Image (spheres, rainbow, N blue to C red):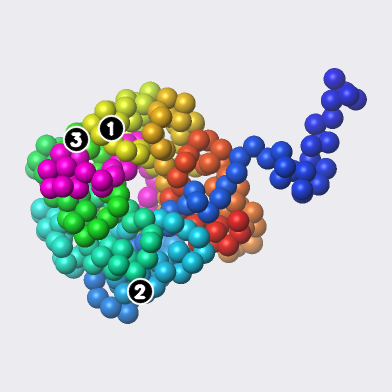
Amino acid sequence: MFPYTRHRRLRLNPVLRRLVRETGLTVNDLVYPLFVTCGSGIKKEIVSMPGVFNMSPDVALQECISVEKIGIGAVILFGLPMFKDSVASGAYDDNEAVQQTVRAVKENTKLIVITDVCLCEYMIHGHCGIVKGERVDNDETLPLLAQTALSHAKAGADIVAPSDMMDGRVKVIRAALDGEGYQNTLILSYAVKYASAFYGPFREAANSAPAFGDRKSYQMDSANRREALKEALSDVEEGADMIMVKPAIAYLDIIRELREKVDIPLAAYNVSGEYSMIKAAAQSGWIDYNSAVLEILTAIKRAGSDIIISYFSKDAAALL
């Protein structure tokens, strides 16, 4: 009771605040996303994501080398294919941009390489699976996801990350990897991926907006909390080594709940719209960019995330 209890005593100066700080954010927590496309010498800024680029494999390799030098240990790759069709052929084409980049990065760095396993960028209709009429067919999509994950593993990916939200895909991917001798390739499942308004800039970057309808029949309803635990536990049971919550900022309560219920490593994806909002506000002089970045990433870590995938990763690494 006041005056004996003075909470402010613990905040008197920066050194003391650091000493009693409860949550530590380090560069070891961060994963840096990269968008890769076929060709050479390509580095095209994404209009809605200032400071983020579509890059050819040679440019992406140089970016990865610079990322490794500042202490970031892992990247996640998203592909922009040479062509699109109705069966996502480019997703499992060994000569596509993701596979080329994986090989180059593994040959020239010690980075952990994660690959996004999804079909939307490679489909003419922009949905995450085989479409019949205007419905995504869950079961017919599973073999293509397994084939894509296997192609990434053969290229050298350390971790494959299915983001499609098809039921049963972790089990099918695990079986395909193990059957071809890739027992040590990890699966980071986008176990809890909400249908979100915060994906807009990503869809510009990856040219992956649906040609019709939306993804609400397979991505989660933002109003649901209990369903998140069911999704996560299903993927753990099917063999996921890590699970992810996406987006991060609007779903900190979900991250917290899963951290208390699930023992495997937990990732959170600080998505494109979250990045672009902060960038736009900072460019308008409405907020301090560096302070906002560290506050947001610390909040994600405080909620319980072990791994943070963020477009802020490079900037944050320089601040930590």
Query: Quarter of the image containing the C terminus?
Result: bottom right
Residue under circle 1? 235
Contact? badges 1 and 2 (CB < 8 Å): no
Residue beneath disc 2: 59
Q: Examine the image and state in which quarter residue 192 appears.
A: top left
Closer-to-camera residue (295/103): 103
User: Is 187 inside the magenta-drawn segment?
Assistant: yes
Question: In the image, what residue occupies the spot 16% across and 67% down?
Answer: 95
In the rendered image, residue 176 lying in the magenta stretch gets the answer yes
Give the alpha-carbon distance from disc 3 to disc 2, as whole Å: 35 Å
- As drawn, the label of residue 171 is 3
Residue 20 placement (x, y as % from top left):
71, 38
**What span is in magenta?**
173-202
Q: Quadrant of the image for the N terminus?
A: top right
SS for dot 2: helix
Tell me if residue 298 can be seen: yes
